Amino acid sequence: MARPKKEDALDISRRAVEETIRLLGERDDFDVPLAAVAEAVGCTAPALYGHFRNKDALLRAVHDAGFRRLYEEKLALSKRLRSDPLAYLREGTRAYVQFAFNNPTLYRLMFSPPPGVAADQDPLSSDAGASVLELAVKAIKACQKRGFLPGMDPNRYAFTYWAAVHGAVTLALQNRAPGDEARFDAAIVVIDTLLEIIAATAPDRR
Amino acid sequence: MARPKKEDALDISRRAVEETIRLLGERDDFDVPLAAVAEAVGCTAPALYGHFRNKDALLRAVHDAGFRRLYEEKLALSKRLRSDPLAYLREGTRAYVQFAFNNPTLYRLMFSPPPGVAADQDPLSSDAGASVLELAVKAIKACQKRGFLPGMDPNRYAFTYWAAVHGAVTLALQNRAPGDEARFDAAIVVIDTLLEIIAATAPDRR
DNA sequence: CCGCTAACTGAATATTGTTAAGTTTCTTGC
DNA sequence: GCAAGAAACTTAACAATATTCAGTTAGCGG
């Protein structure tokens, strides 16, 4: 009873990541047992150690795959809305929030990972999170070309913008949003507030 | 070998929380073994079950104690700087960031707790986090009395402000801050950017 | 057809949260 | 004072789960 029919090695690790993401969608913490992942993939737990050094390595792969998904979703948007920077910023941010609410546990794994998962990650250069920030920087720069946020350092402002959105998302997911609005709305309100501020920085057009 | 000398029940659960906070300071995840807490307190692991229903309940107590500490630190500041709202906002935010960097694991437990710890927490009314937000609302209102942020909804703006600071802190702690500055500086820059924006909303005094 | 390697399996081990049963100390009614 | 009962802890047992180990089988080069 070893070596089933014939299984592509790449296939099994790719499927392990996919199934883990799926299983994360069904629970609210990321302590998914390795045995559950193995069963979903169709093997036993120790078999996974042939593809990942340990559980943290598997979760790190999931973490990275999450950033790739998020990046690709946002990239698709930017192609559609290249012409209107402010609309792209709004819709891109909404897509970001939507992603977080659609995959709350995955989002938590991506941004508040247990340290074993995030460990030894290069300060941020080779990290998938960097490319997400890059998108924000591009969006801010595009807004500046239309006259918004004149004279501001785009990197600095993009990081502040991203921090606000990310903070609102995590607070809302944690149910720490104020008022009686639904949690999702609380995050949307933050976006609207930020966009109002940016819009107010436009040069007068009177 | 049971029932040592005489131990106040309140004393042991208070010390369990304190020792857990201390132990959290020595590690970067919150999987501190119950046995370690028990040894620090001076009892065995099962003894803790007389004071907390389970480990999650202990961590929830730690979570709440963290908010109380944060709240008290900020409250002390507000008494000293009541006269200058913008300075209070700046210093209070710096104290907030300082707290997060001084107690990174505790901060993560407070704001990204495993769901078992945060569970059944009233939407937010009876939560200690609400009082922290209250401080932000008061600070924003005080700023408005001095002419800043005219006409804005203070609750909405306070939440956005808090979200930005919280987001910057978590991103910085996760080493996802951009550029080559130290992580702490990255969070400070966000504060400065936010304060610049608020200052720019003041009515002209020319 | 033979050995060799890769890749997986079942069983074993270690850690850790939790429960069970027993024991000692304190308290309280008499 | 003292016996009965409750309180609060102990040690031992249990359960879940990550990880390791030794064995076994499938495919492949000769």
Image (tube, coloured by chain):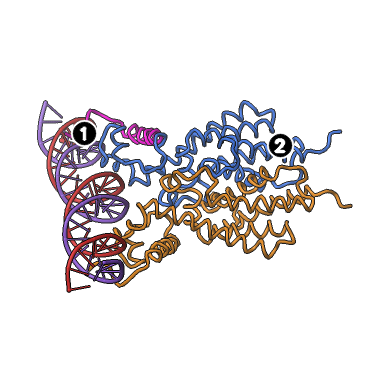
Chain colours: A orange, B blue, C red, D purple
Would you identify the image quadrant in which residue A43 lies?
A: bottom left
Tell me, yes or no, whether dots 1 and 2 are on the same chain: yes
Query: B62 or A42: nearer the eye?
Result: A42
Magenta stretch mostly in which secondary structure? helix
The C terminus of chain B appears in which quarter of the rendering? Answer: top right
Q: Is residue A109 left or right of residue B166?
A: left
Numbered label attached to residue B3: 1
Residue at the image position 39 percent from the left and 51 percent from the top = A56
The three-letter code of the residue at mark 2 reads Cys
The three-letter code of the residue at mark 1 reads Arg
Check if residue A37 falls in the magenta segment.
Answer: no
Numbered label attached to residue B143: 2
How far from the left and from the top, in percent, is residue B157? 67, 46
Q: Answer yes or no: do the residues labelled 1 and 2 have beta carbons within 8 Å?
A: no
Would you identify the image quadrant in which residue B35 lies?
A: top left
Give the structural element (helix, strand or loop) at label 1. Answer: loop
What span is in magenta?
Answer: B1-23
Check if residue B19 falls in the magenta segment.
Answer: yes
Residue at the image position 36 percent from the left and 66 percent from the top = A41
Q: Earlier in the sequence, mark 1 or mark 2?
A: 1
Q: Chain of mark 1?
A: B
